[in-house]
Image (spheres, grey):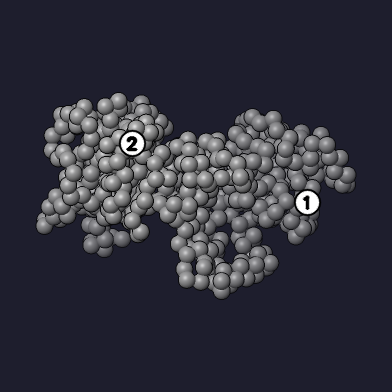
Amino acid sequence: MTWVREAEKASGELLTSGTLMQRAAAAVARVVADEVRRLRADRVVVLVGPGNNGGDALFAARDLARDFGVRADVVLVAGRAHEEGLAAVRDAGLDVIEHPHGPHSECGGEHCDGPRSLQTITAADLVVDGILGIGARASRGLSGSHGEDDSDAAPWASAVRAIGRETRVVAVDCPTPGITADRTVTFGALKTSMLLDPRAAGEVGVVDIGLAELDGLSTDALRWSVQQYAGRWPIPGAHDHKYTRGVVGMATGSNAFPGAAVLGTVAAATAGAGMVRYVGPSRPSDLVLAAVPEAVHGMGRVQAWVVGSGIDGVSEREKNSERYESAIEVLGKAVPVVIDAGALTWLDEIERPEGSVTVITPHAGELASALALLGITDDGDEVTREAVEADPVRWARRMADGTGYVVLLKGGATVIARPAQRSADGITHDRAVFVENRSPNWLATAGTGDVLAGIVGVALAAGIEASAACAVATYIHGRAAHLANPGGPVRALDVASNVGRAIAELVEIKTRFDDDLHAGRL
């Protein structure tokens, strides 16, 4: 635990000296001053919460007055505030108002004035949100845009509701639940909440305040750049052949849902698999042959399997059907597998060889059902779809840790979690999740998950590490949807048909990067 203690010590020293807070405050003040000039704002209000986030906001208010001549009204919304920051604001001669900090609070301080605080907030041209930082949880009683929630569970709820709909909002580090910011000044790296719901943060600026000086701190969530994705997708060389490029097997579709087989197989072929094998009943087999004549039917050599799309897993299991038995046999092989849709209902039966790569691709409802199937609970209570949607990172991680599988949790923002890696001394390393939130919302339509599973299968067959395979496949999936019909609705088959174009974009980006690198332009 040495490196953890050293990081905590370093962080404590920097925070005690005020170094990080002063840097953060200066960055916020610059952004707010820019907004004031641009908007010609006369009335600026700083909402101050109880912790270090509130401290950042207080020092930013001081800096605004001292360095930019902008005098803000300061509203304390939690009954307590960062002492040094509050002293700095008062030394600067700024007006401090204490907002009643609870639904029945009289607050009682000499600066307490509930009606005045609400009037001040309502009249603001620009509000600085310094209420809560990255520790904020939506369960604190606020959700949605400012002014839209009626909950009084949080002491600052009435202050949030007082923010006018036309008021410009700048958030410190990350928006408080219940507030939709126009701009967010965050420190060190993007925060998970911004990746899961980018609309709440508005335009995000990441400021380096020296967090890199703290050894041992890890990033909670990652989102790769397009250039990073481009560097991950394999480009065949002169000596490659179909087996070196990767053979993916598709055990998907059924007589009831044959389209899933077609969608996944088309996606796999278009994604550049060296070869696609298909194993399934006669009806989907015939349709696959018509749509992808190059697909090879029947068992054989593969580098990865995709299992479950378009299969009624519960029914096949109850019948102990030949399809079920053959799928369980496939899932017992030591090649990478993607477990999708119906096969997720077999997780309690599946026995994967030790060390083999496994990816599961549920949406929120399927993940909740899978957690229940495996006996993974929320403090004894069954995990619901709503719980997964409220905290997707938590439940994706719980499933990854509980199974040893990589979890690709599909949603408006797709979360990819890998199992915890623990060293010999018991320290957990690399808990970061991947989040991909650039896909168009039009992807929320039947069959697109089958397409995604096929792309992931190709990435695994090509030898890409499992979590990276999921991340790049998710990006390609979203990009293919955009190319299929920019800005409009898409059919799953059109998404599958545009996977190759999305990959071609990545290849072009990588080629340009390599050319610039070799020419010394980078």
Where residue 118 appears, as percent x and y from the top left, is 76, 35
Residue at horizontal 57 percent and vertical 40 percent from the top:
382
Residue 411: x percent and y percent?
44, 38
Q: Quadrant of residue 483?
A: top left
Residue 252: x, y in percent?
28, 36
Residue 320 badge: 2
Q: Residue at x 53, y 46 (%)?
A: 376
Q: Quadrant of the C terminus?
A: bottom left
Q: Secondary structure at mark 1?
A: loop
Three-letter amino acid code of the residue under disc 2: Asn
**Residue occupying the point 31% across, 38% down:** 324
Question: Horizontal placement of 521 versus 61: left or right?
Answer: left
Residue 491 occupies quadrant = top left
Q: Nearer the viewer, mark 1 or mark 2?
A: 2
Residue located 19% across and 31% down the image = 285
Q: Nearer the viewer, residue 164 or 349?
A: 349
Q: Which residue is mark 1?
A: 80
The CA distance from mark 1 to mark 2 is 63 Å
Q: Amino acid at mark 1?
A: Arg
Crowding at dot 1, Cα within 10 Å, few <14 / some 14-19 / many 20+, comes out as some
- Determine which quarter of the picture holds residue 284: top left
Compare marks 1 and 2 and give the one earlier in the sequence.
1
For residue 285, the mark is: none
